[in-house]
Image (cartoon, rainbow, N blue to C red):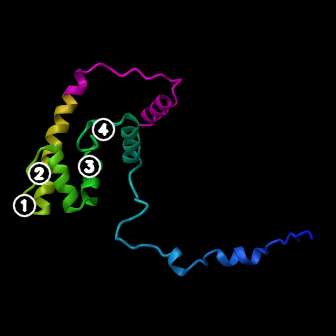
Amino acid sequence: MAKKLVKKDDKKSKKDQAPKSALDNLILADGKVTEPLEDPDIKKVKELEEILGVKKVNPFGTYNLEVFKEKLSDMTNLDLQNLCERVGIFASGSRMQIKEKLLREFKSVARGTISMTAESPSVQLDPNNPLHKRTLKILGEI
């Protein structure tokens, strides 16, 4: 005797799916603005530094003071201490003292890089390369 093929109903597969709960639509309130209202020039600087790979070269992650101040405001005490360790500063004192030390060090390092940049050879950008083309577009807008 031949066996009958029985199709499974889609009802069972629908039952296996977990129903969406109200927790899936929950929005976390952490006190931070998710879409920052920032200056378009600062946004361009961040984008340009990302393309050039400044985060890999500079221990502060940027050469722009405003970007660095914004980054400092978002850091926890542990993040500030780790940055101090990376930069070579002794992280002692209150949170404000550590921020002031980091700002002083950033300004001294940034001042040194400006003079060094003037002496270094210019970078050759190829307009056929998509990353270089994007960089040239951003530089043209500034």
State which quarter of the image contains the C terminus: top left
Camera-nearest residue between 49 and 65: 49
Q: Earlier in the sequence, mark 4 or mark 3?
A: 4
Q: Amino acid at mark 3?
A: Phe
Mark 4 or 3: the one toward you: 4
Q: Residue at x 65, y 76 (%)?
A: 16
Q: Which residue is mark 2?
A: 101
Q: Which residue is mark 1?
A: 93
Q: Position of residue 23 (x, y in %)?
A: 50, 78
Q: Rounded to the nearest whole Å, what is the CA distance between mark 4 and mark 3?
A: 15 Å
Q: Are marks 1 and 3 in contact (CB under 8 Å)?
A: no
Q: Name the element at disc 2.
A: helix
131 within the magenta span: yes
Q: Earlier in the sequence, mark 1 or mark 2?
A: 1
Q: Which residues are magenta?
A: 116-142
Q: In the rendered view, would you say 61 is above or below 15? A: above
Q: Residues within 10 Å of mark 2 (few under 14, many from 20)?
A: some
Q: Amino acid at mark 2?
A: Lys
Q: Position of residue 12 (x, y in %)?
A: 72, 77
Q: Earlier in the sequence, mark 4 or mark 1?
A: 4
Q: Residues within 10 Å of mark 4 (few under 14, many from 20)?
A: few
Q: Rounded to the nearest whole Å, what is the CA distance between mark 1 and mark 2?
A: 10 Å
Q: Residues within 10 Å of mark 1 (few under 14, many from 20)?
A: few
Q: Are marks 4 and 1 in contact (CB under 8 Å)?
A: no
136 within the magenta span: yes
Q: Are marks 1 and 2 in contact (CB under 8 Å)?
A: yes
Q: Residue at x 29, y 19 (%)?
A: 121
Q: Name the element at disc 4.
A: helix
Q: Which residue is mark 4?
A: 56
Q: Rounded to the nearest whole Å, what is the CA distance between mark 1 and mark 3?
A: 20 Å
Camera-nearest residue between 33 and 19: 19
